Image: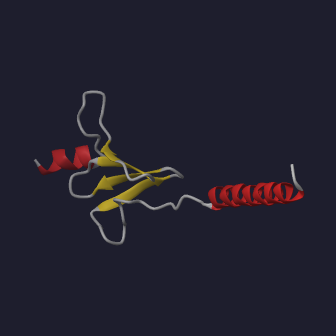
Amino acid sequence: MSDTSRRIATIIAVLMIILIMLLIVAVCGKTEEETDYFFLEESNPRFTVLERQAGYTITVDIQTGVEYLWTSRGNVTPLIDHEGRPFLANGWRDAGRKTE
């Protein structure tokens, strides 16, 4: 190998190492924002937060009493009981009976 070829190979190797290090720093330094994609308390007062953890939020629809699970990735699903009915927050079942 000639002296010029060795220099080119060395420069390419150093550039590759720098590129790999930059990619590692970019990926490791990126933190996932804790954004609720569908649920924004300020813009939608229909939902009240019952529990908030790192990866999920449990809310209750204040008009129906149905509890929902919202994930930090934007998924939402109603919570259901063992019979497949929507799970109602504490007090909603009793409140419904009182008004009937």
Q: Residue furthest top?
A: 83
Identify the residue at image location x=52%, y=62%: 33
Residue at 28% over, 44% down: 88
Q: List the single residue furthest toward the left.
A: 100
Residue 67 position, x and y percent, is 32, 47
Relative to 87, is 11 on the left or the right? right
Residue drawn at point x = 38 percent, y = 60 percent: 37
Where residue 78 appears, as percent x and y from the top left, is 29, 44
**Among the 4 quarters of the image, the one containing residue 85:** top left
Q: Is residue 80 above or below residue 74?
A: above
Q: Can see residue 90?
A: no
Residue at 31%, 60% in the rendered image: 47
Q: Nearer the viewer, residue 35 or 92?
A: 35
Residue 42 quadrant: bottom left
Where is residue 8 drawn, in percent x and y? 79, 59
Residue sitting farthest toward the right: 3
